[in-house]
Amino acid sequence: MQKAYLILENGTIFEGKSFGKTGETVGEIVFTTAMTGYLETLTDPSYYGQIVVQTFPLIGNYGVIPSDFESARPYVKGYIVRDWCQEPSNFRCEGDLDTFLKQSGIVGLYGIDTRALTKIVRESGVMNGKIVMEGTTDFGMTELKSYRIINAVENTTCKEETVMPAVGDTKRKVCLMDYGAKANICRELQKRGCEVTVLPASTPASRVKELSPDGIMLSNGPGDPAENTDIINELKEMLKLNIPTFGICLGHQLMALSQGARTEKLKYGHRGANQPASYKDTGRVYITSQNHGYAVVSDTLPEGACESFFNANDGTCEGVEYEYMPAFSVQFHPEACGGPLDTGFLFDKFMEMIDANK
């Protein structure tokens, strides 16, 4: 395999080997602690513009399984692992990771000390990085330091309305605002008897009113939530319709912003399948799947908006209940694939809210 290098914004260089597409790539370096679900990670639109580091050392051992994808294609800028399995074994396997990355145009790097890299990001914070091939003489530090993620939602949302039928009888109709949605959000709604109309992020509140749904789902997505000013303004009008609304991840942040709250960038974010979220009502801690680099600032929430969950590690806001409208949101992923599924009950709570509002 060809030698390749990771150059960090702070000047640190890691030597490794290339897999996937051969070439250069620049992105924001982030890490995920998930031990499984690398396919879901690769195809999660929330990683748009980022180079993802897997802290679990062996990746690719069960191959490529398209039915597990969270979107039609990967949105990551690059992929870094300690070791990748060249001969996967699984009865559902339909290909190998190296071939999938090549076909998807994703530059990969393996054979570096991912623990040392992760410690740098944890201690110094998220920073830009660049993967280059052996023989590169100009590392392009100006490009590296000036890189930023822009138009993230615009580049990951769907382009037109799509109706997804309910599994079994249709009991409810839900509009899913696609800000870069993971596919399993839609599946969780469908299996609960919801006909889901998936809408582009730019859809105005007037169109949602025309559709007259029983509920509105606000999806996850990538980028800085505060940059989406047009979406935030439309969401503010949408919430005035008093239709039961449930927000996840970016949807949680956008809902809070539409009500006058503020968001902030975290030092290195929460990404992985083992984040503890404490539920204030009961004191119970749930293990959750998360993927976000920004958080709602709790003390900027308006009167009548109460923090419902907080991160047990750093105390950041993980959920909000709105007393003055039928709406709630969480920062984590209750629809998580491949798990944990501890907070799947929140979809049932959404169904109860819808039914009570009919």
Image (cartoon, rainbow, N blue to C red):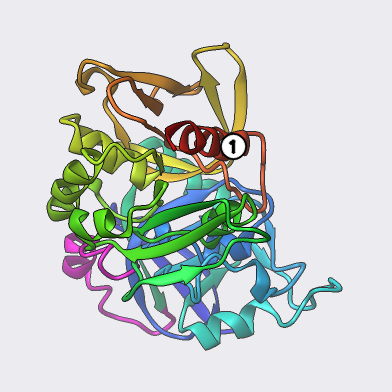
Residue 132 in magenta?
Answer: no
Q: Secondary structure at mark 1?
A: helix
Q: Quadrant of residue 267?
A: top left
Position of 38 compared to 126: left or right?
right
Position of 258 compared to 196: left or right?
left
Residue 283 at what x, y percent from top left? 57, 11
**Residue 197 to residue 260: above or below:** below
Residue 135 in magenta?
Answer: yes
**Residue 221 to residue 43: above or below:** above
Residue range highlighted in magenta: 133-156
Q: Nearer the viewer, residue 301 or 36?
A: 301
Tell me the crowding category of disc 1: few under 14, some 14 to 19, or many 20 or more residues within 10 angstroms, Cα based: some
Farthest front residue in view:
358
**Residue in the picture at 40% in, 36% down:** 123
Q: Nearer the viewer, residue 321 or 206?
A: 206
**Residue in the picture at 20% in, 53% down:** 205
Residue located beneath label 1 in the image? 348
**Residue in the picture at 47% in, 86% down:** 22
**Residue 206 to residue 111: above or below:** above
**Residue 273 to residue 223: above or below:** above
Residue 325 at what x, y percent from top left? 30, 28
Residue 210 at what x, y percent from top left? 26, 59
Q: Nearer the viewer, residue 332 or 139?
A: 332
* Quadrant in the picture for the N terminus: bottom right
* Quadrant in the picture for the C terminus: top left
Tell me if residue 222 can be seen: yes
**Residue in the picture at 61% in, 16% down:** 284
Residue 269 at what x, y percent from top left? 40, 40
The residue type indicated by label 1 comes to: Asp
